[in-house]
Every structure is written in C-alpha cells, then in structure tokens.
C-alpha cells in the first residue's frame, strides 16, 4: 500500500509545498496554502484521467469534415453573436461574472431554449437545490420543456452518470468550483478538484463518438478574474464574461477567448424582474427617444463599435458654475484623464472658458466609452450645455480630436455612417480627410470639417 503523506497546495496558483508556509513562494499570496493528503504512488489516481480513455488516431487535416450543423443555434440573438453563431457541439465553455450579474439565469435560458428545439439539456447545480432552480425557472421562463433535466448534487461522478443516462446534448455545471471527484482528498474548489472535474467534462464534450456542448459556470474573485488556475482558461474553448455597472440594469456579455469566433463581439442584455432580456437593437436602447424637432441642451449623438457592430450612443453633459477653487470633473462613462484632455482642448482651441465650471458626463444606458471616435461628440455635448442650446436630434458626430483642435479620422467610419443612415439620421460631422466610398448611395448629409471650432460654428451659427 502506498505510504500516505501530507502536502500543501496553493489555492490560488496550485503550487505545492511539503510544509505549510504563510506566503506562497510562487504567487506571493498570503494564507492560500491548504493541507491535503497525497500518496507516493499517484498512478492509481491517474487511471481515470481522460487521456487514458481512448486511443485516438491521427487524420489528415484536409480530410476533416466541418459544417454549420455542428453549431447549436439558440434563439437568444445576443448570445449567438458573442459565440460566433451559436454553441459548437463538441465544445467546452466557461461563463463567469460577479455575483448577482445573471450568469445562472442566462445559462438556464440557454438550456430551456435548446430543450424547446428538441435537444436534451441537463442543468447540474452544486450550489442550489432543485426547488430553488424551479422557482427561478417559473419566474424567468415562459414554459419549461420536458427535455430539460435538473440535478442538484456536488458529485461530478454522479453528473457524468446522468449525462450518459439522459444522453444529454447540452450540459450546464453551476458552478464548477462546487463539484468534487471521488478518490481525491481535497476540498471543493481546490485546484486539484476543479481541474479534474473540468478534465472530465472536457473528455465528455470532445468524445468523437458522442460530442456534446458543455457550459461551466465559474466563480469570480474580488479582482473580477475567473477563480482558480489559469490552466482552466487554457483548457476551455471559450471564456465568457458578463459585466454590469453598479445600479444599472444593463448587462454586457463578451468573450476573452473564443476558438470558434471573434473575441471582439459584445452582447447586451437588460436585467428585469422576469430575468435577462436580449437587447437586439442597441442603437434604439442607448439613446433617448424624443419628438421630432425636439432638442435638449447637453445631449449629443455618436456611433461606437462593439465588436463588428456599430451602435448609436447618446452622450449627456452638464456644465455648471463651480464655487470651489477646483471644479469637479466627473466622467461616469469616460476616463477622467480623457475628459480633462478634451476640456483643455475646448478651452485652448475653441476659446470656451471652463476653468470655473463643473463638467459632468455620462451616457444613456451607462455604456462605457473606450474609443477615441467619441471625442468630438463629447466636446459638442459640453459646448451644447455651455451655450444652453440643443443640438438637432438628427445630427451625429464621428471624429477624434487632436491636441491641435484638428479632427482626426477614425476606423470603420463607413459602417458607422451606414448605421446612422439606416436609423434615419440626416447629418453627420466627420474629419475633412475621412474617406467614404459609398457616400453617394447614402441619404445622410456628410459634413467634413478640419477643426473643432468649425464644427461648433456650423452647429451653433
């Protein structure tokens, strides 16, 4: 019989020490080493590893067959967009988000949607009871399909048995850090347990005789990173992350890794009392609907790009007199340094006094602004608030602004202008040297300006 001994494994990076130390030598985290039993002979524990289950044979890459039917396409359009068209049958995906963001609700909605299409779906939870999941399903789902099974258990061995018994096409494990494999003497959530459970699910998904789509819900650390070893992210095919601003109902879904599509796509959902609602037309969501001809001071419109999709966004500014030596600069959706830079350009190049003014900036819907293409729109929103004059609601601004006050070209301008034209806007301001190859085919009027001062004069003349 193998001689038992004790070892200490770091729960953050997986580093192994023969004795306990307060600080992990590998990742420098404090109090992360946990005691666990080990044996001198580990061969017996490796017999169930996925690598020994099958003897795969090599084949010519040119002879490997692929087709669009390998995807499980849901009726949740924003999820399909982020995934690149749907779930691949033999894929392993991890979905993570801060607590309460809606990852479990989204996974349950996907399982229900696929079940209604005739696929067999298994939702295995190690955190909630079956009755809790049923209560959530009654609240967020219009109906519950007979092809949807629920399992409340922390044993990964039992989950694997139910996958084979049901012959499931789609599996959800919520969350992967709560499951354990028999024969491993470590607590749930430890690197050993998490990686072994994920390895079993990887084999289940990649089995050439019976491919399946698997989604693992992963917990997130306080640093907003996926909990566990980095090796878990390397193992899976897709890493999905869901984010939300505090107090906002908007949820953004994006992927940091995707072997079957682009990592730049982003999907938007609205969190309501009845669960997540897919926002299929974000351009209509991120701007205020007003009557024709109505304009409000401090409001300006631009077009941003999230992945391959252009989205019209409304930027709102409020400029007020400051009674302190240091005026307030608040950019809820924009970095403060970027806001201060644009304010300085406005003062120096457009001769608008703001040194004694508070400037507050936000976007409708709470969308974060990360592109330089919004610079002109931010400036025009501030100018509109300073002049107490509204900008016509059929006007947009798409350009970067340099420190010289000159307008700069932005990438993907053509698709942005086409989106504005599709939404019925009549006028757009761009840089003078911006290239538009299909301008003659558009109904929207394209105004080319060299400096920000020319734009201000053209709008508020």
Image: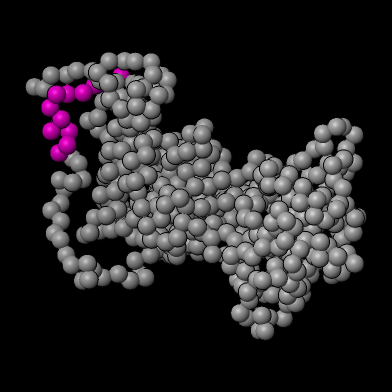
| Residue sticking out furthest to the front | 404
Front one among 46 and 123: 46
Q: Position of residue 327 (x, y in %)?
A: 82, 37
Give, as a single range, the part of the protein colored magenta.
35-47
Judge whether residue 95 is colored magenta.
Answer: no
Residue drawn at the location 83% of the way across and 56% of the way down: 350
Note whether 336 is above or below 436 in the view shown: above
Q: Which quarter of the rendered picture does the C terminus lie within?
A: bottom right
Residue drawn at the location 62% of the way across and 64% of the way down: 410
Q: Quadrant of residue 280?
A: bottom right
Q: Position of residue 218 (x, y in %)?
A: 43, 41
Residue drawn at the location 60% of the way across and 71% of the way down: 415
Q: Position of residue 185 (x, y in %)?
A: 26, 26
Res 203 visible: yes
Q: Quadrant of residue 390?
A: bottom right
Judge whether residue 41 is colored magenta.
Answer: yes
Note whether 89 is above or below 161 in the view shown: below
Note whether 194 is above or below 150 in the view shown: above
Residue 338 appears left or right of 4? right
Rendered image coloring scheme: one colour
Q: Position of residue 214 (x, y in %)?
A: 36, 51
| Residue sticking out furthest to the left | 1
Residue 290 appears left or right of 15? right
Note whether 373 is above or below 181 in the view shown: below
Q: Which quarter of the rendered picture does the N terminus lie within?
A: top left
Residue drawn at the location 67% of the way across and 59% of the way down: 400
Res 300 visible: no
Front one among 153 and 276: 276
Q: How many marks?
A: 0
Residue 86 appears left or right of 67? right
């Amino acid at each position: 019989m193998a001689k038992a001994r004790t070892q200490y494994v770091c729960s953050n990076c997986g580093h192994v020490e023969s004795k306990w130390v307060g600080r992990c030598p590998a990742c420098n985290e404090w109090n992360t080493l946990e005691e666990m039993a080990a044996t001198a002979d580990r061969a017996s524990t490796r017999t169930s590893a996925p690598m020994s289950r099958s003897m795969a044979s090599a084949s010519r890459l040119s002879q490997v067959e692929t087709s669009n039917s390998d995807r499980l396409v849901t009726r949740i359009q924003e999820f399909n967009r982020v995934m690149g068209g749907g779930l691949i049958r033999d894929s392993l995906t991890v979905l993570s988000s801060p607590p309460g963001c809606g990852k479990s609700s989204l996974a349950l909605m996907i399982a229900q949607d696929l079940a209604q299409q005739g696929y067999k779906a298994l939702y295995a939870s190690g955190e909630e009871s079956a009755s809790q999941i049923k209560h959530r399903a009654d609240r967020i789902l219009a109906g519950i399909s007979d092809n949807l099974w629920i399992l409340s258990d922390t044993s990964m061995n039992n989950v694997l048995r139910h996958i084979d018994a049901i012959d499931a096409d789609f599996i959800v494990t919520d969350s992967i850090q709560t499951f354990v494999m028999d024969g491993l003497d470590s607590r749930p959530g430890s690197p050993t347990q998490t990686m072994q459970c994920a390895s079993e699910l990887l084999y289940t998904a990649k089995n050439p005789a019976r491919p399946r789509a698997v989604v693992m819900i992963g917990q997130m650390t306080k640093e907003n990173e996926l909990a566990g070893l980095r090796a878990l992210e390397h193992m899976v095919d897709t890493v999905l992350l869901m984010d939300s601003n505090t107090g906002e109902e908007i949820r953004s879904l994006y992927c940091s890794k995707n072997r079957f599509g682009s990592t730049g796509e982003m999907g938007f959902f609205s969190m309501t009392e009845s669960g997540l609602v897919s926002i299929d037309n974000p351009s209509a969501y991120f701007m205020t609907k007003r009557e024709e001809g109505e304009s409000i001071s401090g409001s300006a419109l631009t077009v941003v790009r999230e992945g391959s999709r252009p989205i019209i966004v409304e930027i709102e500014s409020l400029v007020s007199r400051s009674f302190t030596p240091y005026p307030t600069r608040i950019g809820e959706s924009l970095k403060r340094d970027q806001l201060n830079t644009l304010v300085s350009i406005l003062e120096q190049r457009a001769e608008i006094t703001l040194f004694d003014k508070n400037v507050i900036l936000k976007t409708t819907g709470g969308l974060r602004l990360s592109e330089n293409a919004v610079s002109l729109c931010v400036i025009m929103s501030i100018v509109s608030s300073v002049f107490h004059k509204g900008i016509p609601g059929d006007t947009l601004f798409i350009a970067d602004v340099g420190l010289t006050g000159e307008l700069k070209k932005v990438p993907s301008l053509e698709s942005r202008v086409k989106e504005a034209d599709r939404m019925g806007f009549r006028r757009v301001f761009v840089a003078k040297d911006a290239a538009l190859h299909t301008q003659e085919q558009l109904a929207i009027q394209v105004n080319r300006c060299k400096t920000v001062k020319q734009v201000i004069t053209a709008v508020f003349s």
